[in-house]
Image (cartoon, grey):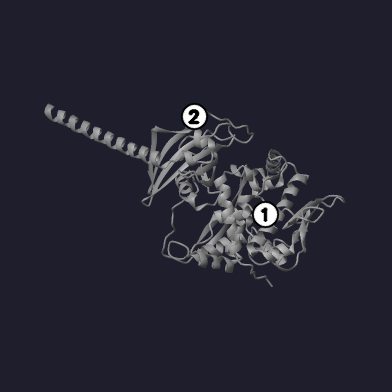
Amino acid sequence: MHKCINYSICFLFTLFLFACNEESINNQENISTVNNNLKLSKFSNSNIAENITVDFENVNEFEKDNFKIVENAAREKNANFLQSDLLQNQLKYQVITIEYANKPYSYLLEIYAHKKSTVYPMTITKLKDFSGALNVYSFDGENLGSIGVSKGIAKNISEKEDLNILTTAINLFSDNSNLTNRIPPCNTPYYLPMQFTVDYYNQTSFDGTVISYDYMYSTTTTVQVLMTYPCDALPSEVGHAYTSAIINDHGAGGAGTSEFENLRIYNNLTGKARCLNTLLNNSGNSFVKKMLEKFEGSSEFSIKISSVDKVYSDAAKTIEINGTTKYDDSDNTKNMDIEISSTRIDAVASLEAARIILHEYIHADMYRKLYTKDKTAIDVQDFKKVFDLYEKNYHSSMAVLYVNSMRDALKEFHKNVLTDDYNKYVANYGTAPSDDFYEAMAWGGLRNGNVKAWTDLPADKKASIESLASGVTQLTKTYTCPN
């Protein structure tokens, strides 16, 4: 008996050593993977490139729902502190690798915690009391966008496909007590109450980066859905329920009064400019619509947008430009007067012409934020901070606060409205236009020496934008107007 016990002890000790060796090997493989692939020197963010070190001694590993997650803490060698009324004063950093469907995904996170949130716990698995924003980078230094976290629930606020895996991984560990897997019996048709919820968030940005994404409130609508397919609803049935509960009730589509009938925008455009302006108003993405809605109904501001043969930036009329926006409060009307050059619009591709119009609308939106009576609105306060930071330069402020939104608006407008031109591009180049291409377009009118946001860009970034922007000349001038 004694001998058997000795053997048992030896056997268990051998298993323990084997387990330790296997864990050590896995840790060494993780260290090697991160060391070989994380290229801090490539980051344009100098704090990350020069001041971040990765802690390889402490590794967290988790597996859930076919996601294998490995986490390493990272830290600043010399701590920097934020001065903010919204955020905790110290940034956190973390390295995460995720394996899903036999494919690896690697991220470096720059973590902004909301002032009222708990401190970031250095793991994505315990975020139920954390709220803030995660700026996400690839191991090659590419800024992939931002994920907002509110009490452990993650949202891909940049709407970038590259962030879907990480967002899903975080939500695997969120505590959502409303979820249920119960399915009614399959023998007879039945009605099932189906809830559709719209969440409202307040987004705060600074220097073009989302730094806070705070939950405000939710509205929930319940619809009784007839389940005619055993154990589940047909997609069409759920679709009809969604249309009834969300789209119709929240004015996001369907027949009826146009969202823009009450806009205080007086349209004196002609020809191509008038057509593209109508398409932007009626079919532009949410950024365009939300911006124009600020001039709706009881707004204290109005816009008059007109076509003129040529527009000049100087009194002597020697410097021709695409358009101009002026703010006039001489008779207390608070009117934005936009002039668009018909000569320029007719000479350029339709997508570039839409960009010119959008550029001038953004000037109007900036004037609105400067001169509104409501100084408490968050978007107004954010703009004022950036405007002052860049010495009251409109184009620098536009570059910092609007370029990403312009990029996305142009992308959606090209694909969904100027479809013929988009398809010709794909057929000609064998690939869809990249986000970088649309971003280069968004920089139009901002690429000059008196725009600090432009001159501050690295030389290779500016060269890439200039090169991509030259491709705009390959787009077509054709367009189809609504009846």
Q: Amino acid at mark 1?
A: Lys
Q: Residue at x 55, y 39 (%)?
A: 131
Q: Quadrant of the N terminus?
A: top left
Name the residue carrying label 1.
290
Foreground: disc 1 or disc 2: 2
Residue at horizontal 50 percent and vertical 37 percent from the top: 49
Say which of 88 and 467 sits in front: 467
Which of the numbered marks, if any, corresponds to residue 282?
Answer: none
Left or right: 249 in relation to 304? left
Task: Indicate whether 179 appears above or below 15.
Answer: below
Rendered residue at 70%/52% (across/down): 362
Relative to residue 144, is residue 433 depicted above or below?
A: below
**Mark-to-mark CA distance, 1 and 2:** 42 Å
* Mark 1 or mark 2, earlier in chain: 2
Decide if residue 236 is on the left or right side of residue 27: right
The residue shown at (84%, 49%) is: 329
Q: Is residue 38 left or right of residue 29?
A: right
Q: Nearer the viewer, residue 5 or 437?
A: 437
The residue pinned by badge 2 equals: 77
Q: Residues within 10 Å of mark 2 (few under 14, many from 20)?
A: few
Q: Is residue 359 visible?
A: yes
Q: Position of residue 256 (x, y in %)?
A: 68, 66
